[in-house]
Image (cartoon, helix red, strand yellow):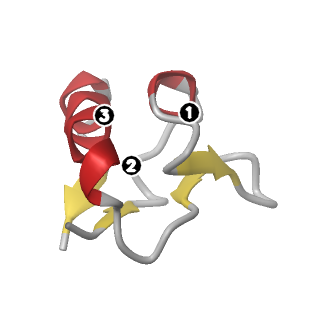
Amino acid sequence: MKVYVDQDECIACGVCIDMCPDVFDWNDEGKSHAIVDEVPADLEDCARDAMSSCPTEAIKEE
């Protein structure tokens, strides 16, 4: 599973980082981004939960 954060849609609320800090973190622009190229199998549920919790649906699966 691969995910990315659409920077145009991210409002920097931090929900994904709070929910799944091993997959998401802040970038230099103060917005969330994926910090892994591929989500490890044991973190896929966490990443999906973060994706579904994003208020702007900025997290996308590749």
What residue is drawn where x is 18% and y is 74%?
A: 62
Label 2 to label 1, Cα distance in Å? 16 Å
**Relative side of 38 to 41, left or right:** right
Expressed as whole percent of the image width and height from the top left, the position of residue 44 reads: 24, 47
> Earlier along the polypeptide chain: callout 2 or callout 1?
2
The amino acid on which the numbered mark 2 sits, given as a three-letter code, is Glu
Image point (23%, 28%), residue name:
49
Report the residue marked by disc 3: 46
Label 1 sits on what residue type? Answer: Ile
Labels 3 and 2: the sequence-earlier one: 2
Sequence-first tag of 1 and 3: 1
Cβ atoms at labels 3 and 2 below 8 Å apart:
no
Q: Which mark is residue 1?
A: none
Q: Which residue is mark 2?
A: 9
In the rendered view, tell whether residue 17 sits above or below residue 38: above
Label 3 and label 2: CA atoms lie apart by: 20 Å
The location of residue 6, given as percent across then percent down, is 38, 60
Q: Residue at x 55, y 45 (%)?
A: 22
In this rendering, position of residue 50 left or right of residue 7: left
SS for callout 3: helix
Q: Residues within 10 Å of mark 3 (few under 14, many from 20)?
A: some
* Label 2: which secondary element: loop
Q: Nearer the viewer, residue 43 or 48?
A: 43
Position above or below: 19 against 46? above
Q: Is residue 61 above or below residue 32?
A: below
Classify residue 13 as left or right of residue 1. Answer: right
Q: Nearer the viewer, mark 3 or mark 2?
A: 3
Q: Which mark is residue 17?
A: 1
Residue at the outermost right position: 28
Label 1 Cα crowd, 10 Å radius (few <14 / some 14-19 / many 20+):
some
Quarter assignment of residue 53: top left
Task: Tell me the crowding category of disc 2: few under 14, some 14 to 19, or many 20 or more residues within 10 angstroms, Cα based.
Answer: few
